[in-house]
Amino acid sequence: MDTNEIQELKNLIQALNSKIDVKLGELDKKIDVRFGELDKKIDVRFAELDKKIDVKFAELDKKIDVKFAEVNGELKVINERIDGVKERLANEEVLTRTVFAGIILAVIGAVFKLFFFADKV
C-alpha cells in the first residue's frame, strides 16, 4: 500500500467518523425529544393521580368527620345515661340508708319497749 491509498483510507475513516458523529447527534436529539415527551406524559398522569388522591382524601375526611360527630353524640348520650344512673344510685343509697336507719331505730325501740315498758302493755 502506498501513501495515497493510506491517505484515502484515513479520509474515508474520517468521513465515516463524522457521519457517525452526525448520526449519533441526531439520535441523541431524538432520544432527548422522546424523553421530554415521556416526562410530560408522566407529569400529566401524576397530576391526574394527585387530583384523584386529593378528592379521595377529601371524601375520607368528610366521612371521618361525620363518624367522629356520631361517636361524640353517642358518647354524650352514654355520659348522660351514666350521670342518670349515678343520680339514681345516690338516691337509692340515701333511701337505703334511711330505711336501714329506720329499721335500726325500730329494733332499738322494740328492744327498749320490751325491757322497760313491757309491764304497761
Image: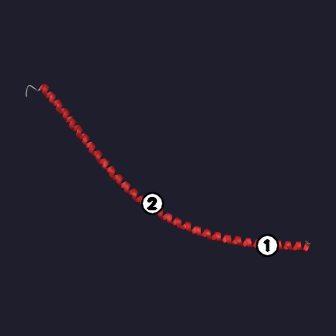
Give the left or right position of residue 52, taking residue 88 as reference.
right
Q: Compared to 15, does 107 lie above or below?
A: above
Give the left or right position of residue 34, taking residue 75 as reference.
right
Please name the residue shown 33% across and 52% down the image. 77
Please name the residue shown 91% across and 72% down the image. 3
For the rendered model, the colour scheme is: secondary structure
**Residue 18: which disc?**
1
Q: Can you identify the residue that label 2 sits on?
A: 61
In this rendering, which labeled residue sits more in front, label 2 or label 1?
1
Q: Compared to 6, does 115 lie above or below?
A: above
**Callout 1: few (<14), some (14-19), or many (20+) C-alpha neighbours within 10 Å?**
few
Give the left or right position of residue 82, taking residue 98 as reference.
right
Position of the C terminus by quadrant = top left
Q: CA distance from mark 2 to mark 1?
A: 63 Å
Image coordinates of residue 13 in percent, x first then y, are: 82, 71
Q: Amino acid at mark 1?
A: Ser
Nearest to the observer: residue 12 or residue 63: 12
Location of residue 112 by image quarter: top left
SS assignment at label 1: helix
Q: Amino acid at mark 2?
A: Asp
**Residue 42: which disc?**
none
